[in-house]
Image: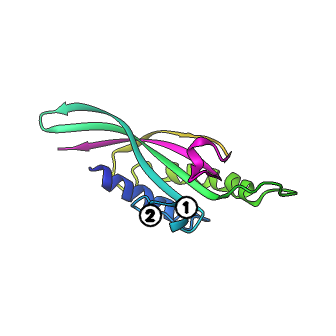
């Protein structure tokens, strides 16, 4: 299994989640190049181990940033971006748990962590513009020869 193949499998899961408008395989140079809500994936740290002769195992964390909409200042009443995040946060978790092998692309998802709803944390800031959204950290066990 390769990092690229896992990103492709994750984005296939994300594209099928209600409300997601974009799940590109390649991260755009600017979030304005995709239709929001968008799920973008960054491969993060991994631990590599030898399993047996000729078999390698890695457990890598993938950072999934979901940009829902730019935060608005001085908006009265409930914010639609916040409301969409609350719904989508749950849908993402359920989608991961529904298929922990990502369609057979990986051995298993070994851990899931989410940030909760964010109104522009440092992880959801792009070009100095804060976005409503959330972040999942998906740890995946992959094996390869």
Residue occupying the far left of the picture: 53
Residue 7: give x, y in percent of width and height.
38, 54
**Could you tell me how many numbered marks the image carries?**
2
Local SS, label 2: loop
The residue where tag 1 is placed is 38
How far across and how far down the image is residue 111, in percent? 47, 37
* Residue 94 makes an appearance in the image: no
Q: Is residue 74 left or right of residue 96?
A: right
Quarter occupied by the C terminus: top left
Q: Residue at x 45, y 52 (%)?
A: 41
The reply to whether the C-beta atoms of the residues labelled 2 and 1 are less than 8 Å apart is yes
Numbered label attached to residue 24: 2
Magenta stretch, main secondary structure, is: strand
Q: Which residues are magenta?
A: 119-145
43 vs 40: above or below: above
- The x and y percentages for residue 112 are 51, 40
């Amino acid at each position: 299994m390769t990092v690229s193949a896992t990103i492709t499998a994750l984005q296939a899961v994300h594209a099928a989640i209600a409300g997601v408008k974009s799940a590109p395989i390649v991260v755009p140079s600017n979030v304005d190049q995709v239709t929001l809500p968008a799920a973008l994936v960054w491969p993060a740290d991994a631990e590599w181990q030898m399993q047996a002769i000729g078999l390698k195992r890695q457990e890598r964390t993938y950072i999934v940033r979901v940009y829902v909409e730019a935060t608005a200042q001085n908006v009265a009443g409930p914010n639609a971006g916040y409301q969409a995040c609350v719904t989508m946060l749950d849908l993402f978790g359920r989608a991961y748990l529904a298929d922990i092998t990502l369609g057979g692309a990986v051995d298993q998802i070994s851990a899931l962590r989410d940030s909760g709803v964010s109104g522009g944390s440092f992880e959801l800031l792009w070009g100095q513009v804060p976005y409503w959204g959330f972040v999942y950290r998906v740890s995946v066990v992959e094996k390869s020869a």
